[in-house]
Amino acid sequence: MWEGHPVNPPTNFSLEAKNVRGSWFGTLHYEDGSRIKDASWWSKMRRIFKPNEPRFQVSVPRIFGVKDLTYLIPVSSPISLRGAISFETFLGLAPPDDLDLFETWEDVVLTMLGDAHATNSGKLSEATWNERWSVLLGGDILCRAVAKYMESGSLSHAERKAVLNRISRGDGQGREFAHNLLLRMCGAISRGRISLNAAKRTVRDRFFRENLTIRELNQIVSSWSILSRDGFINSNLSINILSELLSELKEQPPNRWDNPDLFEMAPDQDFGSFIEEHKLNRFTLFLQELALQQQNFATVTLEPTS
């Protein structure tokens, strides 16, 4: 993204930090979380004499801090979805390489391991292997986990090497499965770091959805389909958690204009010390979203597997 002429290295803190502050307090000025305030005395008079005429919507650009050149962290919005965990807090609670006592990960990866060995042994076709696993393969975290699982197994050295060779063949199209946001949410739920209700609210939030990629949706739907296959045992917890989260993706995120009761305002802030108190210097790059930009998010509808 940042390679080649004429783009400069991604550092715009000195330019955008004050814009973040301005956007935060501008939102408080124009939006009170329950309705849109009209922009002028004239628009208020028009509302009195022409009550059925559409009102002006005054909105402020949202600004995001870019974390690890990957994730968009909202830094300019004083309005948040009630009951949701902030996206940055979620990332800290569910790092991608934290896999101990993680049922969903183990159910998926151990099934992958068995299918890899079955394919290498000629008991499963290459076509079936590719259909089930193509979007989940590859990555250092996955390979280390599979190698660890095989240490206590009965496969020979050659068989282990063949399994690792097969599961390491990723398509190179994105971050590996262990980084999947919905998968990491499953781990946070099953280990008691986030309640199911808070997780469902967080998954509905537009700030979570803005970071969720189509590839991640394909990965998690593939995982749900694999664990839902007839004959798979001990996967009820994983399937239930996945189903609960995916059910929140049937619709677009709630809109604060249409559903004001679902949102809450941040506590009062001090304008003069806002930049320091919010530790905006933890980001070197900020990205700005156009005011009132309309963005539709991918939705998911699950159908029973046959």
Image (tube, helix red, strand yellow):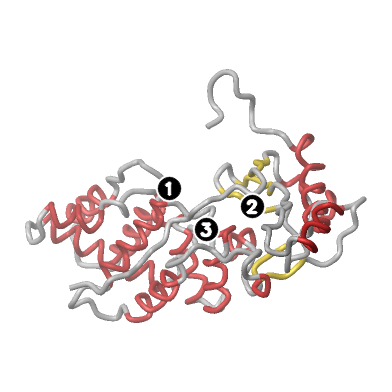
The relative height of residue 215 versus residue 183 in the rendered view (above or below) is: above
Residue hosting label 3? 209
Q: What residue appears at the point 78 percent right and 59 percent down from the top-left corner? A: 37
Quadrant assignment, res 132: bottom left
The mark nearer the N terminus, 1 or 3, is 1
Say which mark, if any, is on residue 73. 2
* Secondary structure under the numbered disc 1 in the rendered image: loop
Q: Is residue 252 left or right of residue 257?
A: left
Q: Is residue 142 left or right of residue 130?
A: right
Which of discs 2 and 3 lies nearer the camera? The answer is 3
**Residue found at the very far right of the displayed protein:** 272
CA–CA distance in space, label 2 to label 1:
18 Å
* Secondary structure under the numbered disc 2 in the rendered image: strand
Q: Is residue 15 left or right of residue 224?
A: right
Residue hosting label 1? 175
* Secondary structure under the numbered disc 3 in the rendered image: helix
Quadrant assignment, res 283: top right
Image quarter (top left, top right, bottom left or bottom right) of the C terminus: bottom left
Q: Nearer the viewer, residue 121 or 265?
A: 265
Dots 2, 3 in contact, CB < 8 A:
no
**Residue found at the very far left of the displayed protein:** 122
Q: What's the amino acid at mark 1?
A: Arg
Q: What's the amino acid at mark 3?
A: Arg
The mark nearer the N terminus, 2 or 3, is 2
